[in-house]
Image (cartoon, helix red, strand yellow):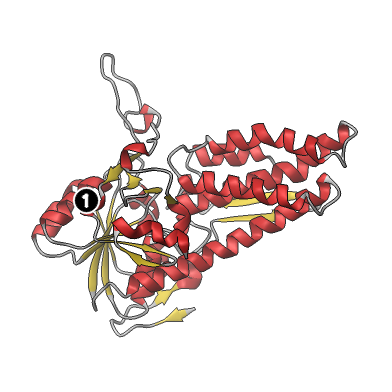
Amino acid sequence: MTERPSSGIKVELDALPRSVDLVRSPDGAAAFTYLDERFLPYEERFETTSDWREIVRAIKTLAVRGAPAIGVAGAASLAVWASREGAKAAAGRGCAYDKDAFFELMGPVSDEVRSARPTAVNLMWAVDRMKRFAEQSAETLQSSWEIADAMFEEVLRMEEEDIASNRAIGAYGATLLDHDSNVLTHCNAGSLATVQYGTALGVVYAAAKQGKIARVYADETRPVGQGARLTTWELSKVGIPTTLICDNMAASLMAQGKIDAVIVGADCIAANGDTANKIGTYGVAVLSKHHDIPFYVAAPASTIDASLTDGSDIPIEQRDPSEVLAKPIEGVDVWNPAFDVTPAGLITAIVTDRGVFAPSEVVQALEW
């Protein structure tokens, strides 16, 4: 799809790759294909694996990242396990039709997948959804092989739901922006963070088609550089004017009146609207408040965890110190949280696939 909005920007949405996808390998069993984001922006390397453990490793090492993409990858890892090891192991124990044995074997696998990235609630949501689906399927299906096939189809549904969800987020979010807006974003919440299209950048893409985007400013996003490596790559492929800045340059841009809105993604949203996102997001929100710039969070309803009262309940993943300091220095400790929590009071609105909500009302999205 190529559309030219009134601003003159040519938006090439067809240039966006599908980041993750569950496929059938030549032997008919499940396999997982993903764009390895560790090699971007200079190499587009797609990998395919038939080992569920490799999918978990891809999640842990940020080869696959972004809450919605991680969720689908987690669901896919269970489908791959079921297709290749789960049903086969049950049959090997002489119980191909003993569904209790299949679920007994699935339990530890599910736990390992859930623990791969502890902050991204979409991962837990997706694994729990797959487990419930498999258990419901077992009520009518006869063997573990049939359950595995049903799980494969469920992941495909999740993929299409994710794309539709992103499109809805984009449509809702675009209504919040004025014509020719300059938008600042932090980390990468685009097509690379989802199956395809994106959350925060989904808003940008939808708005750009309406002539509402003049330029996107992308924070580099230390220490791994998701903004520098991923957001800039993605926006350049689509054709949206982009300026990369160091994280400590955002305040100067805002002071000069060059930012009209900030749009970020989310990995977990608590019941009161407190939001966990990539480390550094909190600081951007504070700057936005000071400069009276709207600060929007874009995420699917599956990112909301109503069981968490507020941001203090959100578990924050601690990453390897080598991401910050390649070689240790004697006597120097490294603190490397992957996320920080932005208080609801700093968030103008939360854009979901079910509408735009005030942070204090975001749990209403779950009732839709």
Question: Which quadrant would residue 291 be assigned to in this image?
Answer: bottom left
Left or right: 169, with 19 as reference point: left
Q: Residue at x 65, y 48 (%)?
A: 132
Dot 1 lies on which element?
Answer: helix
Q: Residue at x 39, y 36 (%)?
A: 315
Q: Residue at x 53, y 56 (%)?
A: 19
Q: Nearer the viewer, residue 344 or 25?
A: 344
Left or right: 97, with 350 as reference point: right
Q: Nearer the viewer, residue 318 or 172?
A: 172
Pick out the residue farthest to the bottom. Answer: 6
- Mark 1: amino acid: Val
Residue 332 image offset from top left, x and y in percent? 26, 19
Q: Nearer the viewer, residue 170 or 357?
A: 357
- The residue beneath circle 1 is 284
Residue 313 image offset from top left, x and y in percent? 36, 37
Instruction: State whether residue 239 appears in this view.
Output: no
Question: Which quadrant would residue 209 be assigned to in this image?
Answer: bottom left
Left or right: 109, with 86 as reference point: left
Q: Residue at x 72, y 51 (%)?
A: 136
Residue 13 image offset from top left, x and y in percent? 46, 72
Instruction: State whether residue 139 appears in this view.
Output: yes
Pick out the residue farthest to the left. Answer: 255
Q: Nearer the viewer, residue 72 or 226?
A: 72
Pick out the residue farthest to the top. Answer: 331
The image shows residue 264, relative to residue 336, as above or below, that is below
